[in-house]
Amino acid sequence: MRDAEILHFHNLDYLRAGNPRQRQAYKVLQKYCVFELLREFDPFLAGTIPIEIDVDGSDLDVLCYWENKNLFISVLQKSFSMMPNFSLREIVLHQHQTVIANIDVDGFPIEIFGQDLPVSAQFGYRHMMVEYKLLKKYGDDFRKEVIQLKGLGMKTESAFAKILGLDGDPYAALLAL
């Protein structure tokens, strides 16, 4: 995928001019200074809201890259622990140390996901870029079908895989495209 196609995702201004849910997401992210507080960790908004396939209850997925896990955890605790439903956990995901914080603000669940892996190499980023490319390729009817399946409770990657007739693990199948 050409850099120009995805460049606009690296600046939140596209949300300000986007659909109503995107504009609301922009206001929440600005109001709570989420990207400003995480600026040293290369924050990137991934998931369904940026590519307009969100449904009620979709969260804001903020991907981060940390080199010092303890510093990242400290910033998360200092910046977000006073917010509603704050939680923090550490796991190993795809052989990488991972820190995940969750908060709920102004009707948006926000998940802050950090790994010791550059954002552009993280699975959340890579899935979103593949999904974006597929949405551009197959158009609005395809988008509506994805949203319909998601509305029935299907996960995003599973919805794409079902529509495209991909077998096996939908996460791996999408990345193989």
Image: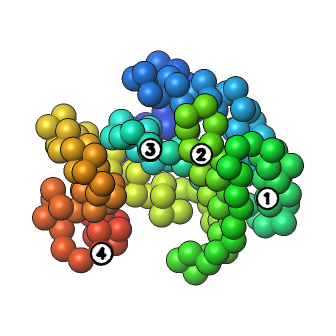
Query: Of callouts 3 and 1, which one flags the residue occurring earlier in the amino acid sequence?
Result: 3
Q: Looking at this view, is 115 or 103 the one in front?
A: 103
Between marks 2 and 1 in the image, the one whose residue lies nearer the viewer? 2
Q: Return the residue at label 2.
A: 110
Query: Of callouts 2 and 1, which one flags the residue occurring earlier in the amino acid sequence?
Result: 1
Q: Looking at this view, is 44 or 47 the one in front?
A: 47
Between marks 4 and 3 in the image, the one whose residue lies nearer the viewer? 3
Q: Amino acid at mark 2?
A: Ile
Q: CA distance from mark 1 to mark 4?
A: 31 Å
Query: Residue 116 at x, y = what percent?
Result: 68, 67
Q: Amino acid at mark 3?
A: Ser
Q: CA distance from mark 2 to mark 3?
A: 9 Å
Q: CA distance from mark 2 to mark 1?
A: 16 Å
Up/down of 32 relative to 114, above or below: above
Query: Of callouts 4 and 2, which one flags the residue occurring earlier in the amino acid sequence?
Result: 2
Query: Of callouts 2 and 3, which one flags the residue occurring earlier in the amino acid sequence?
Result: 3
Up/down of 144 relative to 16, above or below: below
Measuring 22% from the left and 62% from the top, which residue is drawn there? 161
Q: Return the residue at label 3.
A: 58
Residue 12 in sight: no
Q: CA distance from mark 3 to mark 1?
A: 25 Å
Q: Amino acid at mark 1?
A: Phe
Q: Which mark is residue 72?
A: 1
Left or right of 61, for residue 5: left
Q: Are marks 4 and 3 in contact (CB under 8 Å)?
A: no
Q: Amino acid at mark 4?
A: Asp
Residue 100 in sight: yes
Label 1, residues with CA under 10 Å away: few <14, some 14-19, many ≥20 = many
Query: Which of the 4 image quadrants contains residue 72?
Result: bottom right
Kindly state the secondary structure of the residue where label 1 is placed: helix
